[in-house]
Amino acid sequence: MPVVTLPSTVATHEPMSTVSANLGELTPFLCRRPVRLIIFTGLGLFLLLIVIWPLIAQLKDPDFQKHIADHRVMAGMSKEQVLKAWGGPQTINTTFTKEGLRREEWIFEDWESAALVKHRYLYFEEGRLLGGWFQGSGERLPTKTPPNPHNPSPQR
């Protein structure tokens, strides 16, 4: 009877370079160190730009005279500066926080027609402008039909 030999399993040790190369192939793309560094650097620069950009605008015009001349408002303005830039509001709502800080909401109305009004809101705390927003009237205006509506012709 012939003798059958089974192949023996021999443990081989791979060099570290091939092990790390195999691990690099197994790591997902977003988890690789260079990709993470690029993503986090980009996010950091974006956040830095968001913080620094308004400061640069304020450094160019520290007393907001150019903004006032252009009838624009910017966070950090005093109530007097906003009055010079936009004039007086139609409504002022005043509240106080638990800490005793005075907050004001200024509402400006821009009438475009008898039926269409748009509002601008500004928010102040202790006499300094924090921010604001713009709102349309919310009224649905009639939609205009196209001058040449498309009429499909029947196919023969």
Image (spheres, rainbow, N blue to C red):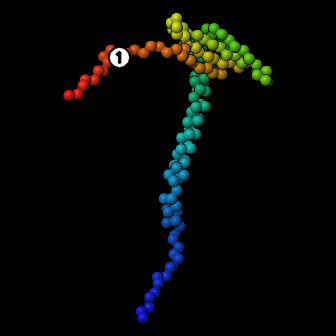
Furthest-top residue in this view: 114
Most foreground residue, 92 or 58: 92
- The residue at which mark 1 appears reads as 146
Task: Determine the image quadrant of residue 135.
Answer: top right
Note whether residue 84 is visible: no
Quadrant containing the N terminus in the rendered view: bottom left
Q: At which x and y percent is residue 94?
A: 72, 14
Question: Considering only vertical position in the picture, is 87 above or below 1?
Answer: above
Based on the displayed image, in which of its 4 quarters is residue 144 positioned? top left
Judge the density around disc 1: few (<14), some (14-19), many (≥20) Cα neighbours within 10 Å.
Answer: few
Residue, x 55% and y 10% (percent of image)? 117
Q: Is residue 53 above or below residue 18?
A: above
Residue that lies at the very extreme toward the right in this rendered image:
99
Where residue 72 appears, x then y in whole percent? 56, 15
Horizontal side, residue 154 vs residue 134: left or right: left
Seen in the picture, residue 156 relative to 106 is either above or below; the reply is below
Q: Amino acid at mark 1?
A: Pro
Quadrant for residue 154, please give it: top left
Relative height, residue 75 to residue 33 (above, below): above
Q: Nearer the viewer, residue 127 or 108?
A: 108
